[in-house]
Amino acid sequence: MAAAAAAAAAAAMGVWWGPVVRVLVLQATWALGGGQVRYSVPEEAKAGTVVGRLAQDLGLEAGEAEARRLRLVSQGRRASVEVSGASGALVVSSRLDREELCGKSAPCALRLEVLVERPLRVFHVELELTDINDNAPLFPAARRNLSIAESSLLGSRFPLEGASDADIGANAQLSYILSPTEHFRIQEEKSRSKSLFLVLAKALDRETLPVHRLVLTASDGGRPSLTGTMELVITVLDVNDNAPEFNQSVYNVLLPEDALRGTLVAQVSATDPDLAIYGEVIYEIDSVVPPSASDIFSIDAKSGEIRLMGALDFETVTFYDLRIKAKDKGTPPLSGHCSVELEVLDVNDNAPEVWVTSLSVPVPEDAAVGTVVALLSVSDRDSGANGRVRCAVWPAAPFGLVSTFAGSYSLVLREALDRERVSEYEVEVRAEDGGSPSLRARRGVRVPVSDVNDNAPAFAQAVYTVLARENNAAGAELARLWARDPDEADNGRVRYSVWEGGVGGVASAGGGWRPASSYVSVDVESGRLWALQPLDYEEVQALQFEVRAVDAGEPPLCGNATVQLFVVDENDNAPALLPAGSGGPGPGASSEAASGPVSGVLWAWAAWGAPAGQVVAKIRAVDADSGYNAWLRYELWEPRGKGPFRVGLYSGEVSTARALEEADGPRQRLVIVVRDHGEPARSATATLSVSLVEGAEAALAAAGSSSSLGAGLRPAEGGSAATGAAAATNVWLVVAICAVSSLFLLAVVLYGASRWAPRAGVLSGPGPATLVCASEVGSWSYSQRQSRSLCVTEGAGKSDLMVFSPNFPPPPGPAAKETQPEPPALLDTVSGPPCFASRPFLDSLFPL
């Protein structure tokens, strides 16, 4: 009974102590499991390096670590340390790189889970990786190009991008040294983020040294110190100083943004050393950064395959951070975590875009080269080469593109403009990215060119020749002048005027000087040249003046044209008879139209028995007109038929047609008509009374009259004069014989002189200056003011000896009056060929 009772008591007691022991064990286990062991090991420690006596620090006895299976719970790449089975020490198993595991985070601590079985216990071990100086400073680029104007002031600062050091602490404290130079120095500004500047210490001179090559060295604070270098290539920009002178834990995935749905992103793998369901791992995506991308990815819960379920867009999100959780099926479940960092790779799926942000039009045609016409903004949502845009302008001239800064361009003028050649340009800006294949975009810009007054009016001819008939009506249109100005609006609106400042005008018949503007005027708007007054050929034969065309630009530009106005003669002057011994019309002559002559009486003597062909008188006449209008012919009007006298058609010489007989009577009355060749013709008449006397009386009469009247013509004196001469025949016979002999000798001398003289004799007298070249074929007189005459005294007669040469008088003034030639007198010749031009030649000069 006692034994049974003791056994029963012991059994009851065991039933009570079992739960108590289990609770105590669990509490002890919880207390021990909640503790943490910390170790520190330098990074890059060699494999096998002992980190710490883990078994001892966990309170295990020697040999107990292997018996109780002390081990680490592997968590992917963190398994860089392991537990030595024999000693229970924590040793380095593979390379530890603090920068890879923690980056710039400090301190860098790895959290390890240590598992002890039999009974099962979990310990947390924290392993801190201490930094060593195993990373040298690294610049963003091995070379940096700077452009600095040589006119930069001393102390000018130019920011530089400093080096980076993956280490931390003193190993990452950088200092900079610049290779020796007297022109530059390095300056550091210590603020929240260190700033590095290149400071100009000495003035630059591009002409002395155009390029500076320097080496910037960065040293960290480790021992030993590590360095990194960057070459600075400083190009000195010229400015006008010499006369002119001028500076980017476990899985990393890269996936292009055009990846298809269902694409395998990554496959994570986690192991659980537990058995059965405690070792079965289930994968899930814990979180996604950014959260909006939570439906883009999916993970297979068993295999750990992460696949793409939506579309990626580099331009929207470039980086995804997927927090993956692997948990077992225990209760409560335990989980481990890792990160899948997905970097989206850009593909060229966006074409460039071009915007015109500013447009300054129209562009003046005199705009200087380099003028900014438009500001453009160019962008491409892609990145890298896919987003690197090249721009060009088409056509290549006269505009070009200048890059002002990234993505901004200026459309500038490259060549001079000419609105008269091209008044508007359609410019196309073409953008092309650097993708493969590349994508393109275009943007059209319309650039009108505004006019400036850069073209002076230009006449179609430098010299205009205008023919105007004399006696034209005042206000008659003479010509139309037109000057072209290719400018537009007021710059091309032309006004015309007769320019008084030019050489123009004419000497009037009264000896004064009259400007061209007193004869002609030009319409301001149309350029119509019209006469202010009737033109008189006998007053002015030619007029030269300048017409100026001025535009309405600012400042105005002008062009000139010379107008040569030739007055075409009209037959408005009748022939005028000249009396003997006089240079002008005599009292016994009258002029009229061809319809009816008016008588005037002249006297001459002829001897009985004079042979045929003897000249008894000569009729002189002049015509103030020119050309055919002044070409005279002489006709015997009365008596008609076979009279004893005849008259030279063109010479005006009255000669015997046959021998004179007594039956002819003592006196003959001849009516001679002088006509010109104008249309209609004009004429003048002269009445010549020829007295028939004895030869001696004729000689005496000729002698007496030659001393006073000359040429055998005298005014009528009545019949008593003839009777007195007959009575004195005997008395004066000897005197007559001597006189005849003297006259014969004088005639021979005069004939020789006239034969060998270089020019014909000149008789002066009142009236308009007229040159007469006379011969047996008639006479031709015309104004000498603006014409030249050529008379030939020897050789065969020539029909084309009339030379018209427009002579323009000098401007009015004393010098002009001194050099103006005296008007030539009437030329009285007997011999020599005719001085006239052929009719076709005259018709070409003076068209009717």
Image (cartoon, rainbow, N blue to C red):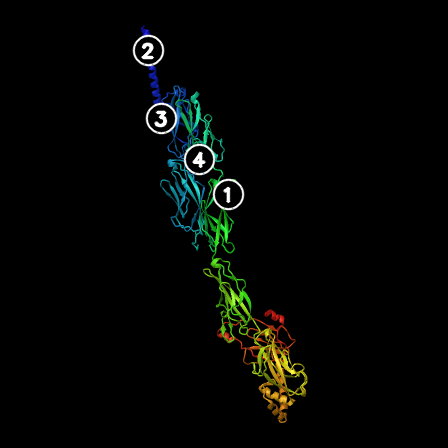
What amino acid is labelled 4 in the image? Phe
Q: Quadrant of residue 725?
A: bottom right
Question: Label 3 neighbourhood size at 10 Å, few (<14), some (14-19), many (20+)?
Answer: some
- Find residue 10 and report its horizontal and vertical position in percent: 33, 11
Quadrant occupied by the C terminus: bottom right
Q: Is residue 274 visible?
A: no
Element marked by disc 1: strand
Q: Nearer the viewer, mark 1 or mark 4?
A: 1
Distance between the Cα atoms at labels 4 and 3?
A: 35 Å
Q: Is residue 25 above or below residue 546?
A: above
Disc ID at residue 653: none
Local crowd size for mark 1, using a 10 Å CA cut-off: few (<14), some (14–19), many (≥20):
some
Residue 394: image location, x then y, percent? 51, 48
> Dividing the image into 4 quarters, which one contains the N terminus?
top left
**Mark 2 or mark 4: whose residue is earlier in sequence:** 2
The disc labelled 2 sits on which kind of residue?
Answer: Ala
Is residue 614 rendered to the left or right of residue 440?
right
Residue placed under numbered mark 2 in the picture: 10
The local secondary structure at tag 4 comes to strand
Q: What residue is disc 3 on?
A: 36
Quarter location, residue 681: bottom right
Dot in front, 3 or 1: 1
